[in-house]
Amino acid sequence: MSAKSMPAPVEAGTPRPWQQLLPLLRPLLTVGGALVAGAIPLLLLRVNPLAAYWSFLSGSLGNFYGMSEVVVKTIPLIFTGLAVALPLRAGLWNIGAEGQLYMGAFAASGVALAALSGNYPAWLLLPALTVMGALAGAVWGFIPGLLRARLGVSEIITTLMLNYLAILWADYLIYGPWRDPGGFNFPLTAVFPKAAWLPRYPGTRAHAGLILALLVAVLIYFIFTRTKLGFELKFVGANPQAAELGGISQAKLTLWVLAAGGALAALAGVGEVSAVQHRLRPGISPSYGYTGIAVALLGKSHPLGVILAAAFFGILAVGGSFLQQTKFPTLFGSGTVQVPVAIVEILQALVILFIIGGELLTRAKH
């Protein structure tokens, strides 16, 4: 064999091509593994998994209404996913996106309800409630950031505990001072003035919050890849001790990223009250904040990955509702069976388990 025809030697430590592709394929393998594992409970119900998954996809993506509802679910998940992904870049865990969402909804509702009894310029209302909602979420994220930076208190515990305070505070207002006396005894606030409604796409509940979510994702990508702050976030997340020796203030970075994460999650709450519900009500979030953790992990804390992961969980939510209404012929027998919506929660849990398992295997190899 001539020297020219011999393969080039591979240097020690140089990843092979398939190893370089593995980080990109891992989310797909995670979803695929979860779907395979999710077939087990379907088989126990005597339902053909392929038929169930096809019905699942056709219900969420096979018609215009389903796709528009996927967008409705995806918008808040992009915001909460980014709210977790941004601090995670610096090695911090924001478990408080759910509470920050509620604080955003609370502050935006306060502005909108005040406009019912005041004379405010209509053009100012939407910007005002958006800014106030983001500020409320930023404050809710700043508190655990301050406790972490000054006292070393775990942000995991404080962000989680603040979720309950925010939800209970919103419930107090809805059942108490903000309750609409004309709401037929239901715990709801009054309907916002139309100037406080975020525009919807005609004939759907999908709204302009999608544009804002995508712009924010692009901004965060720019910060990650083109700014000194993005370098510092990556440096601190990879090696906090070396970053401190290099002159990077972890305290300031902690305050900034947790406050920014709170503002992002709050924008999800602003969208829900301003565009979807047009009022504040109990249970404004079906755990968007907690699902945002899985979105950030599945998306590998990359803005594009977060968008795709949010769309995936949006499809899960809409497809699961459709799946619950469909009757399937039973395997190995006669009759039909309905799939409970809990199957969707099982799939979400399996995705999270596969994500954690993949991360543990990756760390074990290193």
Image (cartoon, grey):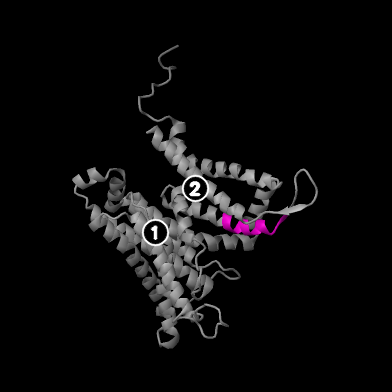
Residue 222 can be seen, yes or no: no
> What is the magenta segment's predominant secondary structure?
helix
Residue occupying the point 55% across, 82% down? 183
Q: Name the residue carrying label 1.
A: 160
Give the Cα separation between the discs numbered 2 and 1: 18 Å
Q: Nearer the viewer, mark 2 or mark 1?
A: 1
Q: Secondary structure at mark 2?
A: helix
For marks 2 and 1 on the same chain, the one whose residue lies earlier in the sequence: 1
Residue occupying the point 63% across, 62% down? 64
Residue 247 in the image: state x and y as whole percent.
19, 49
Residue 235 in the image: state x and y as whole percent.
28, 46
Q: Which residues are magenta?
A: 316-327
Residue 34 in the image: state x and y as whole percent.
56, 44
Residue occupying the point 60% across, 55% down? 342
Q: Name the residue carrying label 2.
A: 352
Q: Residues within 10 Å of mark 1 (few under 14, many from 20)?
A: some
Q: Is residue 336 above or below residue 187?
A: above
The residue closer to the viewer here, 9 or 305, is 305
Residue occupying the point 40% across, 74% down? 107
